[in-house]
Image (cartoon, rainbow, N blue to C red):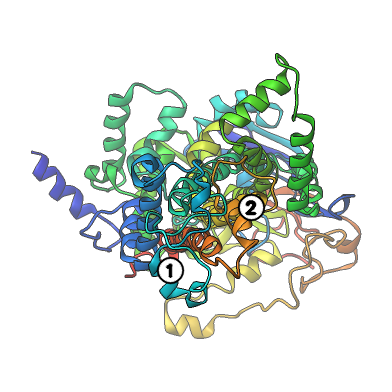
Amino acid sequence: MSDQGAILQVKNLKKYFPISQGIVLRRQIGAVHAVDDISFDIRAGETLGLVGESGCGKSTTGRTILQLYRPTSGQVLFHGEDLTRMNRNGLRGTRRKMQMIFQDPYASLNPRMSVGEIIGEPMLVHRMGNRREIEARTSELLEMVGLNPGYVKRYPHEFSGGQRQRIGIARALALNPELIVCDEPISALDVSIQAQVVNLLEDLQRDLNLTYLFIAHDLSMVRHISTRVAVMYLGAIVEIALREDLYNHPLHPYTQALLSAVPIPNPPAERKRQRTLLQGDVPSPVDPPSGCRFRTRCPLSIDICSRERPTFRQVQPDHLVACHLVDADTKGGEPSN
Amino acid sequence: MTAQLKVEANKNDAGGMQLSRKRESLFVDAVRRLFRNRASVIGGMIILILALMAIFADVVAVKPYQVQVLEDQNTVPSWLIKVFPQMEGYARINEAYPLGADYVGRDLFSRIVYGARVSLTVALIGPLISLLIGVVYGSISGYVGGRTDNIMMRLVDVLYAYPSLLFIILLMAFFRGTLARPEPGTFAYAISQFDSALGGMLFIFIGIGVTAWETMARLTRGQVLSVREKEFVEAARTLGASDGRIMFRHILPNILGPLIVAETLAIPGYISTEAFLSFIGLGVNPPTPSWGAMISDGSQMVRTYPNQTIFPALALAITMFAFNFLGDGLRDAMDPRLRGTQ
């Protein structure tokens, strides 16, 4: 993996949630392998799309990067500094540079605080200026996200979902962050509003030189906004590539199946679209399959898949895959088998 | 310039929804809906009248509560004979007492008026103690979580399992027994002096305090747990907000509603606990009037002079109903699902 221009490096990150039994005599009986040994980097100024099914660990990855969840093991390097080793005070400084936009615009704003208080809070917490300066900056931020600066005294329940999401974006921008983790920022919104919010995010990225980790399950939206795309399956990243590369020449069988599910907005082409239907369900992350995580549903699975976990390796420039069937010399398209 | 700016901003407005014309905070909306609820308004008014009555008892009561006029004992006014005809043959009539006099010739009405002081003080101090201890305890337990939470809640379970009335009775018996004749200058002496100055209410507060906080602690913990996982708390954490800030700015304001409602609905319980303790003779010291003590005194002759039991019991019942109605109205008013109705 190249380090050039990487703003954030994730190395062998693991996050297991313990499952315990008993109330008085608590003992751990297992663990949910929510994120299991993933490595990737995010380059300055890019948008890294992170896609996958529900429950594959996308959100956990985002939250573990921000240290909202402390990782089980692994490293998260932000500008070369390991966040996993920092204590709360150390993290405070870094948190100014890394912010998050949440999925549910109804749950992510405190209903008892006015818009002005919500957007002003980060500046208050980090003591960025006096009250007058914070108020001025709040109006500026509201305008930046396309809301009326006169709304500062209103409460979240007076706004629609799209407007609330804009308030959440303004809050994330208040500290002038470099990296924003967008945790499905549009999936809770109406389709007509989704485009507006995505356009806003793109405009802000251009104007403020932001870097995004964009978590989503809407493949078309990810294709629209991302520079590179990472595909997750059951707690592991199976493929990372530049956007066009991934969408046109997916190498991992899971990516291929996933992309074949995207409808084409063109009836003749849509009729010819061949869907790869996967058999069975996603295995439980409590007890993931041995070897390759995907082997239980993979149409191409062979002997080695159950014995060895495939290494996540670069097979083409900027194209990394974790699959036994993809050879380093494969020039796109089908895995050789 | 500003007008232009506003038009510009409005044009950029996304989301489509027209903002409601009336800008109401949640609090204003809750108050408005509380006032629309007739039962709770009546309850609130009764409590207000009782409070005024208790504060201005010296003016409202026609006679002092402790003066005994032995020749007037068990006398009744003539209107009571009409209500209870069986008293006709034996009751002596004396119009000077609006609700009659008790077995040592004290004015019942005046004693009920003064008795409101005890009941309302309990209604005020009880929630105060249980909120103070219970909310702090429950918040810590819920927010810290893990092992701390486990230990703290098991302790509550143990205390909860013990019958609280029995606990209070034992406690009162202990206090009254050991502190009956303390040496002057000791701590016990100071406490017992303070207790007598309050007419014996201090131990009632302690008795209610040691048991009432448990329910509140459990409720608070549950509420904290449910709000703690909300995204806006995570957002505050992402911003680098301190635990104190998250607790006081984000969690507490969002759980206050249910706590206030639960506490209001618990008040009748405190009042009846006090009345019960006074009834069995462990409450306030005579001659301080308490409704419970009056009911106890009157119950000796409930067949011959029912007025001596019925009126204090009525006062107690009305007060408890008033708090119940108010609590019920508060619950409806603070329920976010009912917002905008009525």
Mark 1 and mark 2: span between their CA atoms? 30 Å
Q: Chain ID for label 1?
A: B
Check disc 2 and report the residue beneath it. Answer: B273
| Residue B80 numbered mark, or none | 1
Asked if labels 2 and 1 touch by Cβ distance under 8 angstroms, the answer is no
Residue at horizontal 41 percent and vertical 29 percent from the top: A123
Tell me the quarter of the image containing the C terminus of chain B. Answer: bottom left
- Please give left or right for residue B187 compared with residue A175 in the image: right
- 10 Å crowding of disc 2: few (<14), some (14-19), many (20+): many
Residue A144: x and y in percent read 29, 42
Residue A278, above or below A139: below
Which amino acid does the dot numbered 1 rest on? Leu
Secondary-structure class at tag 2: helix
Q: Does the image show residue B89? A: yes
Q: Residues within 10 Å of mark 1 (few under 14, many from 20)?
A: some
Quadrant housing residue B44 = bottom left
Q: Position of residue B330 (x, y in %)?
A: 43, 59
In the picture as drawn, the residue positioned furthest to the top comes out as B185
Q: Amino acid at mark 2?
A: Thr
Quadrant of the image containing the N terminus of chain B: top left
